[in-house]
Image: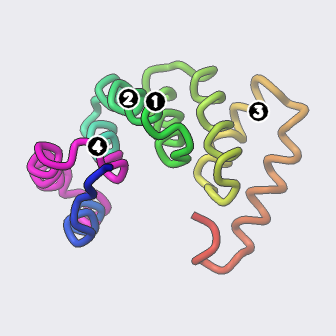
Amino acid sequence: MTTLAPGNLLEEIQSKLANGAVSEAGAVIDKLWAVFFEDPNLYLKALYHRLSNQPSQALTLLTELTTRYPDMARAHQEIALNSLSVNEPKAALRAAGVAVALDASLVKAWELLEPLHRTFTPEKLGATQDQIRFLKSLPPNYAR
């Protein structure tokens, strides 16, 4: 059974990352990682790597994470973001597609798909744009 990191520390990490305190968030993540390395919430370490311009490290971590937790939509979304950072648009297309298949409310993944569909699968572009409009029309707590 996976032991989960304390929620208050995960919230602290998210807050620090959102406010640009990337190195401070990294310090908290490293402490938690030593004890809770199997906690799927620590995909935040991959987010830290992406924000620190280390997309290859993020992709390595996310590959391990999605092997253990294949249904983790946000991890697939992060793979898409990091794949774009290393100029792998087809990998980004696959990962974002998996993310929205697992959780259709991930507006960021749909937004990633829009230009990718325009380039690689234009027949899907209209449906993607419709989904983005729909999600953005929902109250803030529904689209993620």
The answer to whether residue 123 is left or right of residue 135 is: right
Q: Main secondary structure of the magenta part?
A: helix
Mark sitting on residue 117: 3
User: Image point 82% across, 27% down: which residue?
Assistant: 121
Could you tell me how far apart the alpha carbons at marks 3 and 2 are, in whole angstroms?
27 Å
Could you tell me how far apart the alpha carbons at marks 2 and 4 are, in whole angstroms?
10 Å
The answer to whether residue 128 is left or right of residue 34 is: right
Q: Is residue 49 magenta?
A: no
Type of amino acid at the residue the image marks with label 4: Glu
Could you tell me how far apart the alpha carbons at marks 2 and 1 are, in whole angstroms?
5 Å
Q: Mark 4 = which residue? A: 38
Q: Mark 2 = which residue? A: 64
Check whether the beta carbons of the residues at disc 2 and disc 1 lie within 8 A of each other: yes
Q: Secondary structure at mark 3?
A: helix
Residue 123: percent from left, percent from top: 90, 32
Q: Residues within 10 Å of mark 2 (few under 14, many from 20)?
A: few
Of mark 1 and mark 4, the one earlier in the sequence is 4
Type of amino acid at the residue the image marks with label 1: Thr
Q: Mark 1 = which residue? A: 67
